[in-house]
Every structure is written in structure tokens, then in C-alpha cells.
Amino acid sequence: RAADLTMSTSRSADSLGVNVRIVNLTGHKLPTGYPDGRRMWLNVVGKSAQGDTLFQSGKYDTASALLIRDDNLKVYEAIHGLTEARSISYGMPPGPSLHFALNDTILFDNRIPPKGFLNIAFQSRYAEPVGVTYADSQHWDDTHFSLPAAVTEVTANLYYQTISKEYVEFLKNENIDNIYDWNNWGARLFSAWETHGKSAPVLMNSKTLQVEPASVENEMDNIAATFELYQNYPNPFNPRTDFGFRIADFSARGGSASGGGFVSLKIFDLYGRQVEALVNERKAPGSYRITFDGSRLSSGIYFYSLEFNGKTQTKKMLLIR
């Protein structure tokens, strides 16, 4: 009863667009509570008419207790860390940290606000979203996925987990050779976690939609949608991340347009100033991946923009140093 899940689809060129909306029905951030290891994520599965899985994001491997990272993965979580000043005093590296009692900053927090959310009210309590933007009164979040055109059934699952394998392993390893750990608590906690199901994810909500098969006519009617820019991965990142984009090829479907054209991929800071030009050349139809090293940039929010044949798509990313 904590979240509502709705889903809509639309066909565009040679792909199926899927938008998943999660609405927060609670009186607090979703998810809430102790941040380390606690998370919520979307698992989206697209299947063909024959039942074959053609797309999956947010897959969880129960055997290894690991959430499989992919380019489209959407996780709702808070990431705490150490500022450079605090890290120096502790003799530790700055950035993301699971040392909850030592951390002095929030590097990322995309948890969904509750109904009645106001940015200024949350800022006054140092509880505002970090690395993402929610408008006043917005208590929902939308995530868009691009699936193969042959998908005819889409399922979206919302999962919640109280403690990740990464965090419980951190607690175990931090207590190795700890003279104050008189009862071997780190190892005992890890053993209890393994024995009692490894904090298996809980299914909060789920929805399945049947979609009409793609047709050449529908694709050519939407020929304007000739390219797609993906979310960078990882995000947040330090200092390297990958950008992916796709240029459609309509000639294979009998269209007159090949889909090729001039491509420009640039990075901008919060003030709209260009800080990097990654691509500035003609590209043939296909999928591309560009690696970016942000070592010379300072921590903060940046935007990256893909321009193709006079049209532009822009997305946001967070660099944590």
C-alpha cells in the first residue's frame, strides 16, 4: 500500500516506448528509513508474442543476491558520503561511504517525496532531493524505457529491499581484526543474513500490459523519432561514465530515409556552459557508446545533450568526486 504503479506505452519508429510512473502513497519519502543498503527499484520485462524475453532491466539474481546493473536501471535510494575536508581528518578517501556515523554529506537522494512536498520546506531541514529535481507538490516519478519493436507484453515490477549484499559484506569486512568486536558481530550478522533469505526483495506492486504488434505503417508514420539518447551509466559516477545513443535505420523497412546524419554530443554545467564536446561528426545508423572521463571536473550536476539533424535530447547526470 506504499506505492501505486501505472504504465503506458507508445510506438515510435522501430521501438516501443514504455513509461512507468510510481506514486508515493505514504507520508514520507519512498523508500524511507536508514539509508545504507535500503533501496527500491524497477524491474521491467518485455516479451515477444512467442513468450521470449527481449528486454529486461532491474533483474535481481537470487543466488548471488546481487542486483544486475544495466543501462536502464532505475533505483530509488540515498547515497551518503564524506566531503574532502571531513575525509582528510579521518584519513579516508572522499566520496560515497557506508560509514554512516562518519558521513557528513548526502551525495544523491532520488527517493520520491510525499504528497504535499515543497522544495523550500525540505531544504530548510536539509532533506531536499539531491541529484534530481521534483517540482513542488510532485509525489510521483516517471521513468521511460525503450524496448525492441517486437515486444508485445510488458511487465513492470516495483521491488523493495531492506539491506543489500554490498552493505552486509561491508559490515562483515569492517569488523575483521576489530579488537572491539568482542563477539564477532560482523561475521555473525553476515551468517544470519545468509541463513534467513539474504534479505530477499519484496514485490511492492506489479502491472502487465498487452501491446499491439509493430507494423511498418506505424513505424513510417513516426519516422520523425529517428534517434534516442540513453541515461549515462553509472550515474552518479566518479570519474568515468558511458553515454549511449541510437540512430534508427528506416531503409531496412522500405523507408526512403536511412537514418544517418550529423551528430553532436556535448556536456554542459548547471549554468549552460559547454565543458566538453564528445562527438561532432556524421554518424551512420546504429548504436553507439562513448566513455567520458570527468577527472578534470568538480563534483556536481551536469547535463549532456545529443543533437541529431536539428533535433535535441538532453539528460542530467551527477559527478561525485
Image: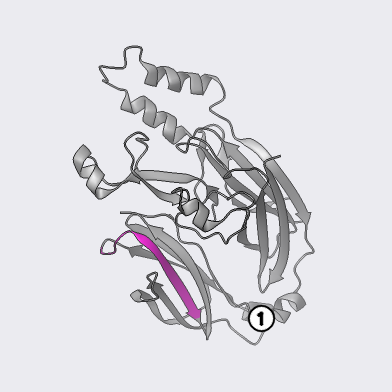
Q: Residues within 10 Å of mark 1 (few under 14, many from 20)?
A: some
- Image position of 255 with respect to 316: above or below: below
Residue 107 among magenta residues: no
Residue 267 x, y percent position in the rendering: 39, 72
Specify whether residue 71 is in view. Answer: no
Q: Nearer the viewer, residue 284 or 37?
A: 37
Q: Principal SS element in the magenta part?
A: strand
Q: Which residues are magenta?
A: 296-307
Q: Number of marks in the image? A: 1
Residue at image coords 67%, 61%? 18
According to the picture, the residue beneath numbered tag 1 turns out to be 223
Specify whether residue 260 is in view. Answer: yes
Q: Amino acid at mark 1?
A: Ile
Residue 304 among magenta residues: yes
- Please indicate whether residue 297 sits to the left or right of residue 198 in the image: left
- Image position of 86 with respect to 173: above or below: below
Q: Nearer the viewer, residue 269 or 73?
A: 269
Residue 34 x, y percent position in the rendering: 48, 35
- Image position of 299 with respect to 261: above or below: above
